């Protein structure tokens, strides 16, 4: 199934907002998609969660305010909690969804390799019988 871009309504649900500015939300979702496509193109199925996360950060804290005081109330947000950007976790999730993350194996054996031994087994120079304790009697 191909990637289906999230809607402004889905961004509102993601952020638990009763009302959302549809034009601004659509703009941020489109910019988040463009930003995600710098890591993986085309976006895989399931990338909508990353797109919503990126757009959600920008929607709730566009100026990247870290500390704010209004009267007796003060709010401190984590560093880098606003604006439109991808975190290391976002990039990792996109790569994983596209099947590009994790460990892998490289087989150096050529396709024309023959599984038979490369030395003569019968002409190895061993007698038919080995000394006691070496396997054959």
Image: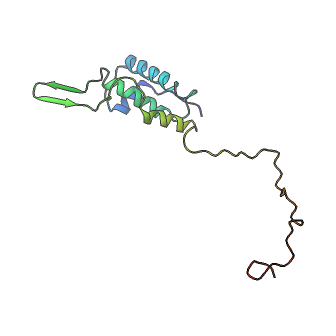
- Residue 13's place in the image compared with 62, above or below, is below
- In the image, taking residue 137 as reference, residue 32 lies left or right, namely left
Quarter assignment of residue 112: top right
- Residue 102's place in the image compared with 123, above or below, is above
Q: Position of residue 118 (x, y in %)?
A: 84, 56
Q: Residue at x 55, y 43 (%)?
A: 102
Task: Tell me the quarter of the image containing the C terminus.
Answer: bottom right
On the question of residue 19 being in view, the answer is no
Q: Residue at x 57, y 35 (%)?
A: 98
Q: Residue at x 81, y 78 (%)?
A: 130
Task: Tell me the quarter of the image containing the N terminus.
Answer: top right
Residue at the extreme left:
72
Report the front residue among 24 and 61: 61
Give the number of callouts. 0
On the question of residue 59 being in view, the answer is yes
Q: Position of residue 58 (x, y in %)?
A: 36, 24
- In the image, taking residue 109 as reference, residue 105 lies left or right, namely left
Report the front residue among 131 and 28: 131
Report the front residue among 108 and 69: 108
Report the front residue among 86 and 109: 109
């Amino acid at each position: 199934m191909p990637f289906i871009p999230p809607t402004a309504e889905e961004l509102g649900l993601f952020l638990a907002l009763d009302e959302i500015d549809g034009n601004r939300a659509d703009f941020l979702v489109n910019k988040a998609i463009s930003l995600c496509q710098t890591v993986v193109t085309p976006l895989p199925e399931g990338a909508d969660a990353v797109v919503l996360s990126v757009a959600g950060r920008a929607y709730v804290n566009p100026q990247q305010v870290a500390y704010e005081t209004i009267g007796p109330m003060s709010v401190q947000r984590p560093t880098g909690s606003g604006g439109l950007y991808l975190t290391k976790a976002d990039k990792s999730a996109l790569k994983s969804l596209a099947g590009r993350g994790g460990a892998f194996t490289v087989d150096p054996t050529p396709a024309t390799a023959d599984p038979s031994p490369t030395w003569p087994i019968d002409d190895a120079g061993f007698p038919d019988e080995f000394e006691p304790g070496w396997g054959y009697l």
